[in-house]
Amino acid sequence: MTTVTTPGLERFRGLVSDALLSEIYDLARPLQGVHVLHINTTAQGGGVAALLRVLLPLARELGIPHTWRVVQLDEFAATFMARLTDMLQGGEPGLITPQDQRQFLDSLRSAMQPLVDERADLYYVHDIQLAPLGQLFPYMRPALWFNHIDTARPDPAALQYISQFLDAYALCTFNTPFSVFPQLPAERTAVITLGIDPFSERHAPLSESEGVVLLAGSGIDPTRPLITQVSRFGRWKNPWQVIEIYRLVKQRHPEVQVALVGALEASDDIRAQAILADLQQCAGDDPDIHLLWDPAQLTAPVVNAFQRFSQVILQRSSREGFGLTVTEAMWKYQPVVGTSATGVRYQITHGYDGFLADDAESAASYTLRLLEERELRRQMGEAAHRSVQERFLLPMMLRDYLAALLRVRQLVASA
């Protein structure tokens, strides 16, 4: 049988193996014409929206119709889910009262009303915010669920609460093996390794002269060393430690600057504004601490410049489902100073293509090494780029995604 190729996928020929591309075409063939409806809570900001924007066009090119719909949560539902997310990520134990549970489900039913007439062959529900949908709306069959957060060490009460909704899904998918819920049978779980699109505007080649102009336009002095964390302003991203590391490094390199780059655009992130305000107070009047949050300013080329031309990239997350900003920086030849958070340690091999350290003092020591040892930075950066090319590009994610869809179609056919 002749394989019909697609332009979007053929761009990767030479970056990934021919065998991988052939596997993707083979997986896609029996799925052609199968309509998949994705549902999440935000169209802008956050990793889920970013993934869908690159994944769905490739799937459509392969002849698999895809639709994407957004459910807008009200303030109560968003607050309830933020608390549950903290618990599932191993934060402080919380209380999930029956009244809160009822109110949340009522809010979710109301939020879904604009979508009740949507029909598809497969339904793909994203993250814990929407996990109850499969149970609340039985017409959504067969359905898959994707957990994007770090659930390697969940609070037992929160895990029990969310697990009651998962029987409605033919397959539950996770972005690392560490976050898979242990009580789920293996035949109902899959890991979809995430990947970036190196051809997107955010990852386009950028000359140093272009990068200097973009950094200067963001208030950075391009003649002095720069430490950067690109991440939304969230509690689990630990931006306060970025400032702590910067202050430790500055004791030896007074000329150093730091940038916290995180656009306030995710509509389902209700805490970012308060965290930004707290960081502004923490930064005080230090002109070398740059907090960048305006989505109009943080265009794809600007973020690209920060990732490519900072001297050191940090990712200080205390919890991380995957962490695509780590992937992005590594692709741009940056060894990241990360933590043992699930998604970060999944990507970084300590001492080879980056460093892992949870405390500020050790992280500052590794930051100093990268600032002062240019050859080390170059070698580790080359290794980081190779690691992403071998493991975390978009075709790898597409293969795992199509395999998950096909598993569900086969399960339904054999039932």
Image (cartoon, grey):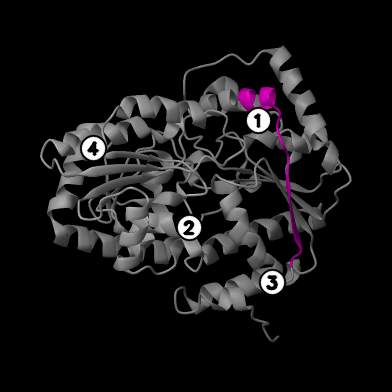
CB under 8 Å between discs 4 and 2 = no
User: Gap between marks 1 and 4, in whole Å?
Assistant: 41 Å
Q: Identify residue for label 4.
A: 246
As drawn, 381 above or below 70: below
Q: Earlier in the sequence, mark 1 or mark 2?
A: 1
SS category of the residue bearing label 4? helix
Neighbor class of circle 2 (other Cα within 10 Å; few <14, some 14-19, many 20+) is some
- Picture residue at 27% right of the left edge, 61% below the top: 381
Q: Tag 4: residue type?
A: Tyr
Q: Earlier in the sequence, mark 4 or mark 2?
A: 4
CB under 8 Å between discs 2 and 3 = no
Q: Which of marks 1 and 4 is nearer the N terminus?
A: 1
SS category of the residue bearing label 3? loop
Q: Which of marks 3 and 4 is nearer the N terminus?
A: 3
In the rendered structure, find residue 300 and report the number of the disc placed on it. 2
| Of the two numbered discs 3 and 4 in the rendering, the one whose residue sits closer to the viewer | 4
Q: Identify residue for label 1.
A: 163
| Of the two numbered discs 2 and 3 in the rendering, the one whose residue sits closer to the viewer | 2
Q: Tag 2: residue type?
A: Ala
SS category of the residue bearing label 1? helix
User: Gap between marks 3 and 1, in whole Å?
Assistant: 34 Å
